[in-house]
Image: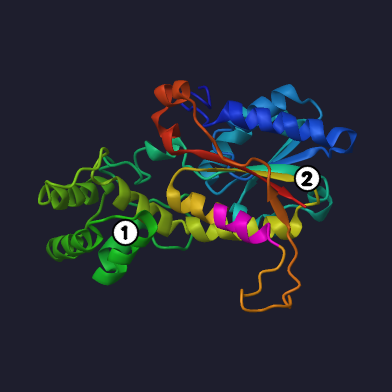
């Protein structure tokens, strides 16, 4: 089996060109370790390992199944000491990467999208047509609640907040109400059952058009919630700022506006010097700029890539330098 079969890494060419620029700018001062915070199927790391024989990559993935597969498929790189696989959340990288290795990290990538193998694998609960599960946790061994627990036990207002605040779902209140009404009859046990509830709500509001499956945003909101995705992104950015060496780069790939907003706000806030309120005449905060945006605007997919991989349409690649 080809580990990458059916998987198309998003914005790969744009990433590789910027990685090459990073190597060019660092020259002989470049250290030898790169971090892939979201290894998945290895789509962004494999081209680097193939092209740069001196490169060592530390790769994270919260899914133990993905790590187990990668250990077999990439065993040659692992045995050669060029690929270190870590089953853990990237938000905890500061406690999972040895200090000696951290000093040699000159860059990292974080692709915040979920891999196709997880999205479409039956029994994981991510897919609209999954009639076997409603788990949605990247690491099913984690102690956090599954999506099934959330929709069957959380209050109507809590559900509405999840749908609205995490995915901008315009019918959040109506969907939450429909979920509560349905679970009074019987538990919601699969993602396909939940998706059909959402679609029914939209059918009652025929004037609202989405262009995608009606269940898209509500399902995404649940996935974000059970995996604490936004909190993890914020934690990663904060810890990277505190732990990455000067002149190292972080490449981030986001897939929807809320993710991108987190990255943009981080760049905006951390690239400023003084952050005192406007009414304060003399700076008292002692805040110093810690990052800068390498590109004025994010890289986006070409028309050719979007034609081959529709998921790339909303993807944005931002490059952050720690100064």
Q: Can residue 236 be seen in this view?
A: no
Q: Please give left or right for residue 69 compared with residue 221 in the image.
A: right
C-alpha separation, residue under disc 1 versus residue under disc 2:
38 Å
**Residue 281 in the image: above or below residue 94:** below
Q: Pointer 1: residues within 10 angstroms few (<14), some, or many (20+)?
A: many
Out of 50 and 141, give the one closest to the viewer: 50
Where 233 sits versus 173, above or below? above
| Label 1 element class | helix
Number of numbered markers: 2
Residue for point 89% across, 33% down: 28
Q: Overall secondary structure of the magenta stretch?
A: helix
118 vs 201, left or right, is right
**Which residue is found at the position 76% from the left and 72% from the top?**
286
Residue 291: give x, y in percent of width and height.
71, 53
Up-down: is 295 above or below 243?
above
Which span of residues is magenta-colored? 264-272
Q: Where is residue 74 in the image (x, y as percent from the top left)?
A: 64, 29
Is residue 145 inside the magenta stretch?
A: no
Residue 147 falls in image quadrant: bottom left
Whichever of callouts 1 and 2 sits on the residue coming sooner in the sequence is 2
Element under label 2?
strand
Residue 125 visible here: yes
Q: Mark on residue 105? A: 2
Q: Position of residue 93 (x, y in %)?
A: 67, 54
Nearest the camera: 84 or 181? 181
Marks 1,2: beta carbons within 8 A: no
- Work out whether 184 lies above or below 253: below
Q: What residue is shown with label 1?
A: 163
Question: Which residue is located at x 84 percent, y 37 percent?
Answer: 30
Q: Residue at x 42, y 58 (%)?
A: 226
90 horizontally vs 231: left or right: right
Q: How crowded is mark 2: few (under 14 residues within 10 Å), some or many (20 or more)?
A: many
């Amino acid at each position: 089996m080809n580990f990458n079969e059916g998987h198309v890494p998003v914005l790969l060419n744009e990433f590789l060109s910027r990685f090459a620029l990073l190597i060019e700018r660092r020259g002989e001062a470049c250290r030898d370790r790169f971090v892939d915070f979201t290894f998945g199927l290895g789509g962004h790391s494999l081209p680097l390992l193939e092209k740069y024989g001196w490169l060592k990559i530390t790769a994270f993935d919260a899914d133990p199944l993905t790590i187990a597969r990668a250990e077999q498929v990439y065993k040659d790189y692992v045995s050669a000491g060029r690929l270190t696989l870590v089953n853990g959340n990237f938000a905890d990288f500061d406690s999972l990467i040895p200090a000696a290795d951290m000093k040699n990290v000159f860059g990292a990538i974080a692709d915040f999208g979920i891999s196709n193998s997880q999205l479409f694998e039956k029994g994981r609960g991510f897919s609209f047509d999954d009639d076997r599960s409603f788990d949605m946790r990247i690491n099913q061994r984690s102690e956090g609640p599954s999506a099934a627990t959330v929709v069957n036990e959380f209050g109507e207002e809590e559900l509405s907040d999840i749908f609205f605040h995490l995915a901008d779902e315009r019918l959040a209140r109506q969907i939450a109400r429909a979920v509560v009404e349905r679970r009074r009859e019987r538990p919601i046990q699969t993602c396909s059952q939940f998706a059909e509830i959402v679609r029914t709500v939209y059918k009652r509001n025929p004037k609202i058009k989405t262009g995608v499956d009606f269940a898209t945003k509500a399902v995404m909101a649940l996935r974000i919630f059970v995996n604490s995705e936004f909190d993890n992104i914020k934690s990663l950015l904060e810890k990277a700022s505190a732990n990455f060496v000067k002149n190292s780069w972080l490449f981030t790939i986001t897939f929807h506006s809320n993710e991108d907003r987190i990255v943009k706000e981080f760049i905006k806030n951390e690239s400023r010097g003084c952050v005192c309120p406007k009414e304060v005449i003399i700076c008292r905060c002692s805040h110093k700029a810690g990052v800068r945006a390498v590109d004025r605007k994010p890289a986006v997919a070409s028309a050719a890539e979007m034609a081959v991989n529709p998921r790339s349409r909303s993807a944005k690649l931002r490059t952050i330098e720690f100064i």
